[in-house]
Image (spheres, rainbow, N blue to C red):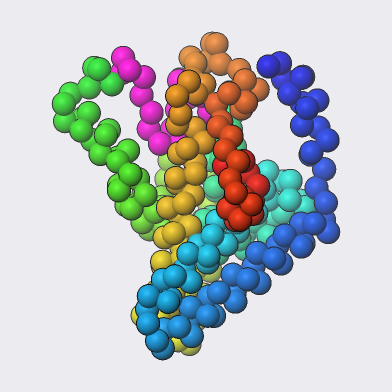
Amino acid sequence: MERTTWGAVVARYQQPETRRAVVQLLTTLLPLAGLLWLMHRSLAGSYLVTLLLAVPAGGLLVRTFIIMHDCGHGSFFKSRRANEIVGWITGVLTLTPFAQWRKDHALHHASAGDLDRRGHGDIETMTVCEYAELTPERRRRYRFVRHPLVLLGLGPIYLMLSQRRLIKGVPLNQLQRFSVWSTNLAILVIGGACSVWIGFGPFFAIYFPAMFIAASAGIGLFYAQHQFEDTYWHEHREWDYATAAIRGSSYFKLNPVLQWFTGNIGL
């Protein structure tokens, strides 16, 4: 598909609506706050109830992350400043430095499906020929990372504790470095305040399972979006941005409830 054709198709969907954005924000963050409060209250009884409440709370954190994603694209609000502020706040809630993530995500869009520019915002992917040339040990490592228990079990912990907490990889400018450090500081301050208020154990018992569910769901959704039979991969000289965007992403229409939790992103 030519970029001009693709641009014409999506042009009418590129105008943010502030009123709808505010409604989406309130209908996400207020229920999230309510569920976290209920999780805290449920600790007085069975922790199983707390874990059950963590499921919808995790879903709302997925939706919060998608709002941050849209702010990163500058498409949630008309105001750039509003996108910056809400993006940073939702980034703190999802343990994601907004400006740093926005840069890496932009690089992901600019290189998705390009065999010569892999490594931005996706799981390591090799061609059949590349895999055939690996040593047996390297093949086991490649399959190990892609195992569902590793991808969805250890992957969320890696995201929360390492990948987005440290400044590494792509060179960052001053704003992006500030995003990392300010997000880390906000997480420490909020986590510390909540720990003083209700205790570290209860705070961890509430937020960790909800965030784990959200991160695991996010990894699974992102994996399904780009890892499928006949997805788009080409060497850079043959790679096309618009074609990669259309043919390199799956579309899976979920039921209305899951569609709402995933922000109608077509997964």
Residue drawn at x 31%, y 14% is 129
- Whole-percent x, y for residue 257 in the image: 61, 56
Q: Position of residue 232 (x, y in %)?
A: 52, 21
- Secondary structure that dominates the magenta span: loop
For image coordinates 66% across by 72% down, the residue present is: 30
The answer to whether residue 185 is seen in the rendering is: no
Residue with the most extreme front position: 255
Residue 102 falls in image quadrant:
top right
Residue 234 on the magenta segment: no
Foreground of the two, 114 or 228 = 228
Q: Is residue 168 left or right of residue 38?
A: left
The answer to whether residue 115 of the structure is visible from this angle is: yes
- Residue 266 higher or lower than 20, as above or below: above
Residue at the extreme top: 237
Does the magenta-highlighted stretch encompass residue 129? yes
State which quarter of the image contains the N terminus. top right
Is the C terminus in the top left, top right, bottom left or bottom right quadrant? Answer: top right
